[in-house]
Amino acid sequence: MDETLARHVMEAAEALRRLLDCEAPEVPSLPRPPPPPPPPPPATVTRQEAVAARQRPAAFAAARDASGTSRGSPVGSIPQFAPAFVDLGDLPEDLEALRAMVASCTRCPLHATRHLPVFGEGRTASPTVMFVGEGPGADEDRTGLPFVGAAGQLLDKMIAAMGLAREECFIGNVVKCRPPGNATPTPDQAGTCVPYLHAQIRALRPRFLVALGATAAHALTGIPDGVARQRGRVQRYGDIPLVVTYHPAALLRNAEYKRPTWADLQLVMARLRSG
Ligand code: URA
């Protein structure tokens, strides 16, 4: 690593440390996160089974605790939302056509209570990182922009601390319309909207994906386990590296998530640095 790059890395790591208020690690060598729990068994369902399962989405409703962590699903790890099982058939490959489609979407009941749909924003040609949240809150619903409320301000700081500019990233969500009361989207709502997310990724071709919270993790990995079981390692979404970490709103509620989130963001930084 040349000197300038090493200095940038050290500055970014220090900024991230200050932001997340953790102990300083050895830089540039990365702190080793605790060994991840054993990965869930690979899904063995067939496409037909997954399609049949999608027709009874209530069976997938995983009980969630206050942190958004799944306490398990009655049907295990069927990748209901995963790209391999989601039909993008009628969705355009062009991002602007997709944006127009989302703007007038009435596919699920959330359209009736939304003020503005939130398509997402940022660099549209191969963004450095695409961050995926759960769904718009009140501020996002009012402005039509993602992550502009309190969680968004923390996300901005996290992006800056990673040494990135918000403009070089793309920020989106699993559902594009606000669930009333900021509720977690139901499996029906998320399942109806998730093809838009997969089509966005197809059009954007981000260098890296970061899933913020359990809903985004489920959408991108297909696995309805909570963040704790999916974070701490680089996974893959097709050929795009993917890291799951806590949602900034969870960090605002629970300081214990700061340290693991920091470790996850450093995994992203390390992988981006290495090419
Ligand atoms: N939380 C999200 O998941 N997305 C937003 O856009 C805002 C808050």
Image (tube, rainbow, N blue to C red):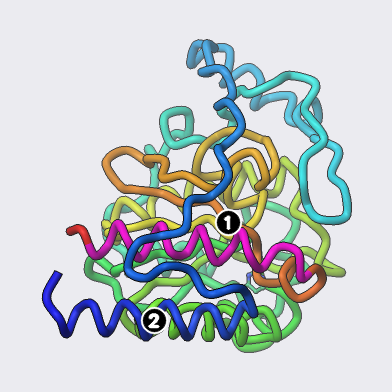
- In the image, what residue occupies the spot 56% across and 17% down? 41
Identify the element where label 1 is drawn. strand
Total marks drawn? 2
Q: Is residue 172 left or right of residue 28?
A: right
Q: Is residue 102 left or right of residue 134?
A: left
Q: Quadrant of the image for the C terminus?
A: bottom left
Q: Residues within 10 Å of mark 1 (few under 14, many from 20)?
A: many
Identify the element where label 2 is drawn. helix
Disc ID at residue 245:
1
Residue 274 percent coordinates (x, y): 20, 58
Residue 102 percent coordinates (x, y): 50, 64
Q: Residues within 10 Å of mark 2 (few under 14, many from 20)?
A: many
Amino acid type at image mark 2: Ala
Mark 2 highlights which residue? 12
- In the image, what residue occupies the spot 62% across and 77% down? 20
Q: Is residue 156 left or right of residue 198?
A: right
- In the image, what residue occupies the spot 46% across and 83% down? 14
Q: Within the image, what quadrant is residue 239 found in?
A: top left
Please tell me whether residue 257 belongs to the stretch shown in magenta: yes
Residue 228 percent coordinates (x, y): 67, 45
User: In the current view of this chain or complex, which residue is farthest to the front?
Assistant: 26
- In the image, what residue occupies the spot 30% across and 47% down? 240
Distance between the alpha carbons at the discs numbered 1 and 2: 18 Å
Q: Within the image, what quadrant is residue 35 found in?
A: top right
Amino acid type at image mark 1: Thr
- Please give the range of residues in magenta: 255-273
In the displayed structure, 20 sits above or below 190; it is: below
